[in-house]
Amino acid sequence: MLMPPPAADGAIVASGDDAPFLAWRTRELARVEAAGLTYLDYTGAALYPESLVRADADRLTRVVLGNPHSLHGPSTDASRDLDAAREAILGFLNGSPAEYAVVLTQNASAACRLVGEAFPFGETSTFALTADNHNSINGLREWARRGGARVCVLPLDPSLRLDDPVGRLPVAMGPSLLAFPAQSNFSGVRHALSLVDDARRRGWSVLLDAASVLATGSLDLSQVSPDFICLSLYKIAGYPAGVGALVARHEALARLRRPWFAGGTVDWVSVANERHQLTAGAHGFEDGTPAFGAAGAVALALDTMRAADRPAWACHVLTLTARLLAGFADLTHANGAPRVRVHGPSTVVDRGGTVAFSVLTSAGEPVPYWDVEARARDAGIALRGGCFCNPGCAEVAFGLSEARVTACLDALGDRFTVPALAACLDGRPVGALRASLGIGSIARDVDRLLAFLAADA
Ligand SMILES: Cc1ncc(COP(=O)(O)O)c(C=O)c1O
């Protein structure tokens, strides 16, 4: 099932034959075709294979699961499923249980919050984050500020890659945190993971956002050692939604200071004496009752994706990305002007299958993304529009960082809408479209988008 990878220099090689992948797609995602859909939002969520949900429905009809905080049989069975889920997640990342713990969360955002609210930020601390980050990382700056930390943003160059991040990272003075995504959910750029060890050597703790990269890529914790990693299962396998994880080095977890306790996180609580003792390790971070019904699906999901031959799909997705980029470059108006502008790299070097773009008029003006998004939706093409919860990339891509934007945002207040902001900025683009490929994508999906854009006036 292996296909040749794109040329190492990033040259665009559009390749046709995706027959082996088509077979998987036909078997596992027949519902997509039945719905008349062209699904191009894998960075939003992967699509679950049918065999996975059938296997899980079968599992659920055979087990009796109870609240894991009780001690009866159904409860210990639920606890066993939760342990198996933690183990499967760590195995998926090739992490050692001697080094890493897995905290089950609702999603990647909840994992980020666990770090932000408990990181020992103080007046000697810095929170450094790359301009390319999802809002679930950007929001950590509020915890950092609350603790008195300095916040510093590592900038992007015009191609939306990091601009000398190591050179800009000082030696950490107090407890300091660096957060960045392994893969951008805006541009698809894969940032160099060597930054993790460079930063740790300078005394930083590192939170690596793996939510987006794990759609087709891998993270090998025997090769790279972030202190914290966040992820969501639905981005990997489309299922189970509502399960994510914070994977943390044991010593990094021990440095966190939880601001509260909840059911399930304590050895004991005294109301009369206003004291409590947090449970050591991962359990001290799992607030309330974890998703015990879904936990049994985690290993199933990860095994199903492994059996689908993820490395072959990763290669295929990159080949399709090359096809998409080449197709965009070929789309021109009658006057020769380009119809599409790509935001981010236009080659497949160090990137995943996520491509942000704007549609242009023959005069070179961007067409409002929401118009294209709506027409695409009517044509059964699922694209994402906006800034994809990644305003830092949007600010660089559209030059939105100056005072005029702030003035517009202040003036709009709670009347803010994206079209209103664009109008205040005299029609300047404030968002883009995003096509993202994943496990299940075939050449026809790319070709349908290209045909739609070619026909769209
Ligand atoms: C890079 C990245 N980080 C974090 C998140 C947040 O994930 P979730 O919504 O599952 O918490 C997303 C979601 O799209 C993402 O793409």
Image (spheres, grey):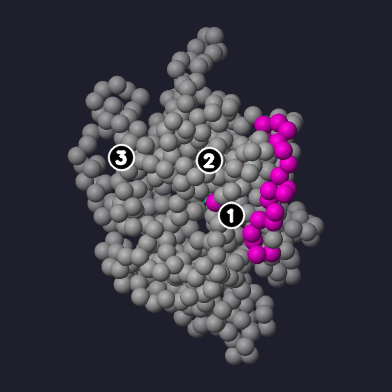
Residue 340 occupies which quadrant of the picture?
A: bottom right
Q: Position of residue 197 (x, y in %)?
A: 59, 42
Name the residue carrying label 1.
191
Q: Looking at the picture, tell me which residue is in the foreground, 200 or 414.
A: 200
Which of 187/167 is in front? 167
Residue 80's x, y, as percent? 30, 31
Q: Quadrant of the N terminus?
A: bottom left
Task: Tell me if residue 347 comes above or below residue 352 in the rendering.
Answer: below
The mark tally for this picture is 3
273 up-or-down from 41: above or below: above
Left-right relation of 78 to 265: left
Q: Kindly report which numbered mark, 1 or 3, lies closer to the viewer in this rendering.
A: 1
Q: Magenta region: which residues?
A: 158-182
Residue to which mark 2 is pinned: 225
Q: Main secondary structure of the magenta part?
A: loop
Residue lying farthest to the bottom in this orientation: 334
> Which residue is depicted at the point 70% across and 36% down?
172
Q: Residue at x 36, y 41 (%)?
A: 88
Front one among 362 and 104: 104
Per the image, the residue denoted by label 3 is: 296
350 within the magenta span: no
Whole-number angstrom distance, CA of label 2 to CA of label 1: 15 Å
Residue 168 in magenta stretch: yes
Above-or-below relation of 182 to 315: above
- Kind of residue at disc 1: His
Residue 143 in the image: state x and y as whole percent: 65, 36
